[in-house]
Image (cartoon, helix red, strand yellow):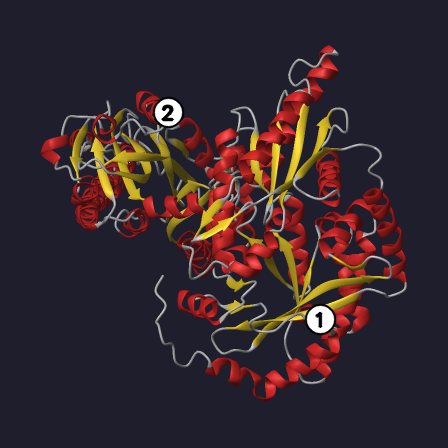
Amino acid sequence: MGADRDTKNLNERPLNSHGHEGSSVDREKYEHMVSARGMVNRMLLTYDDESQVFSEVCRIAVEIGKIEMAWIGQRETGTDRITPAASYGVGIDYLSDIYISIDANKPEGNGPTGRAWREAGTVVLQNYGDDSSTAPWQHRTARYGWKGTASFPILKQGQVHAVMTVYQSTANAFSGPVLALLEDLASDVGLALERLALMEMRQRDHEALLASERQSQRLAVVAERTDNAVIITDTKGRIQWVNAGFHRMTGYTLDEVQGRTPGSILQGPETDRETTEMMRSKVRAGESFEAEVLNYHKDGNTYWVSMQVQALRHPESGMLESFISIERDVTYTKQREEAIRRLAYFDPLTDLPNRTSLTEQVTADLKASSNTFNTFNTFNTFQTCFLAFLDLDNFKHINDTLGHSVGDKLLVSVSSRLKKIARAEDVYARVGGDEFVIWMRNTTRTEASKLMDTLRWILAEPFCIEGHRLTVTCSIGMACYPEHGDDLETLYRLADIAMYEAKNQGRNRWRIFESAMTERITRTAVIEADLREAIYNNDLLLYYQPQVCLLDYHVLGMEALLRWNHPVFGWISPAEFVRLAESSGSMSDLGEWVLRTATTQMKDWLALGIDTRVSVNISSVQVCQPGFTAVLRGILHDVGLTGDHLTCELTESIAFSQTELVETVFRELRETGAIIAVDDFGTGFSSLSYLTRFRPEQVKIDRSFVQKLGYSKDDEEIVRAIIDMGRILNMKTIAEGVENREQVQILRARGCDAVQGYYVARPMTGPEATAWLLDWQNGGSKRFSAQFLVCDDPVSM
């Protein structure tokens, strides 16, 4: 190798008889070392492992070069210590637990090995025992009789990689030609290590290239077979390559699009401009991005894609080379999402804004007016506004006598007439069965009064529905902002009072709230006071209505329904007194009474061998109450019941209003064993993202959709969407308000899990429910299921 020239020069020099030039002993040592170096070089050509190389070098130095002991040390990672990597010869136990440093400030760093590492040069000690630098190790070496020692750095790519140290028992053993040969040997080892490193690098590069080629082949196969569109563009976004999935999705071939940008081909007037500008900006900046965008097929039809665009850069230079876009068709998902999302803000029957939409718009208006007033002490944003509450007179009679189909069509016709006279600045909303609310912005009392008269006149003209000539009147109550109140709840309540005043005065009229309308307010005050006593005296009642599984007809649960027979007012609607309980501070006590009574009843059923769940409605006040779940645990403990027999029903507006709080409450409820049901789904937020986040175990389809099954395609589609969504998210769907066999058949055919309603059983008192459950176990379920063993007309949705 590179030291042959030195070897040649040394051979030409004579050795004398005193161990210098001309000595036969020195010549013998020299010849041994020449042989050792030759053998090392031959070994270096065949070995490809560094540890093996080090071991063989030490062995050959001892056996062939007649060195008494040789070792090679390397720096321990992260420290200043040199530790043996290989050793051979007499006295290698000397290296056991030895401490050698490269730190010049330590005694252990000033020996030959440490200095050779630090100085990157040969260090020779001709008489080991007389040199003070070896003091830390002399007690170890005394028994071996070593006198001469030398350390040689092994360099790799110009840096010290290891140190070879050798020992002899004769003084002045390492000088002249022998020393030069040992230096050359260390150099040869360093060159060999560089060769090994180069070979390893080439092997890695070769393997990486093969892996890259295999990966490219696999990716090409995947790209061609996937249904997703795959697009590769240059750095300017111009198409270079597309897969077969792109052709199937867009209708375009590679020849038709090559060299053009995707946006110039696939996007059109309905594509969101903000999204397309974001994509262009990302391409200009050479950045990766994700987006959902509306595209146009070659035939002109639109479709939605979810795209992931990755900027590809050179692994070493970092220069942008291309973009790869993977696009997935999400049209069906977007359509379903939009259908359910629309339920959050629009009434599906009339397409008017719903209560949620009304609440958001009015609340925003009032906040804007309040801010303007507080800031400028003026009322420039909204001067005077009116909230009108409109209720159709005798609509229930039409529903009961002519059927829900006629009733629904009448509501649609009423809504159409309302839309015709609606001003652009006003909000018309359907908030209940036959209840509408009009929010009139910047309106004087005279203008509001004229509009109320117009409403009555346009609705008084007869409607022709399914051959029936129907005359409809309405009662309207109004409240004025800011005269009567400065928040929606107050305006809504006072408009409601005024509406009932209009009904009490003979219907078919409108009234603006006046302070003299105290009767209803008095009733409210009486109910609020009496409700507290009713809770304390246990004068309330719970009725129970079964939820029956459509797969095997077992009772999935019994919903607890609150009832109150007031000594003066008679049966009061739960909607009325629960709302008053929430506003008056009685809801916590009322909620605890319901939970305790319902779970006690469930415990009694279990004692009779009736294994089901009791389902309890939870109000927003309870959910927001600190320690609600602790109260629930206490009740379960007192009753001696586990949460495994409890279902907590919350309306979707509650579940999705305070997400962080509700998420905590849901988790704590589930820790008791209880499950969660979202009630009245489809009438509020109907948010897929929230359902995915909270994962309630049950979703209850609102009765307003169920009751129209069989004659309303729109409602059937909504029900289908909710059931499909429940199946995808692994949530049981329960249809409320089931009243006939046809509805059950449709729900069963669509895969609805359970039904609840008069067709199964009316709400029952505790004893009645117990008798019903026992009868159901003893044959009632078979009688019910027998109705569906034969289906005359297969249901097709």
User: Does residue 203 appear in the picture of this structure?
Assistant: yes
Q: Residues within 10 Å of mark 2 (few under 14, many from 20)?
A: few
Above/below status of 552 relative to 379: below
Q: Position of residue 755 (x, y in %)?
A: 53, 68
Query: In which quadrant of the rendered image does the C terminus lie?
Result: bottom left
Quick check: 694 left or right of 12?
right
- Say which residue appears at 68% left-offset and 53% top-offset: 665
Residue at the far bottom in the pictured view: 778
The amino acid pointed to by label 1 is Thr
Residue at the spot of label 1: 642
Q: Front-most of 93 and 764?
A: 764
Q: Residues within 10 Å of mark 1 (few under 14, many from 20)?
A: some
The amino acid pointed to by label 2 is Met
Where, by quadrant of the figure, is residue 519 drawn? Answer: top right
Q: What secondary structure is found at the residue carrying circle 2?
A: helix
- Say which residue appears at 47% left-offset and 83% top-offset: 786
Residue at the spot of label 2: 278
Q: Position of residue 584 (x, y in %)?
A: 83, 46
User: Where residue 40 is drawn, which disc sits there?
Assistant: none
Residue at the far left in the pictured view: 255
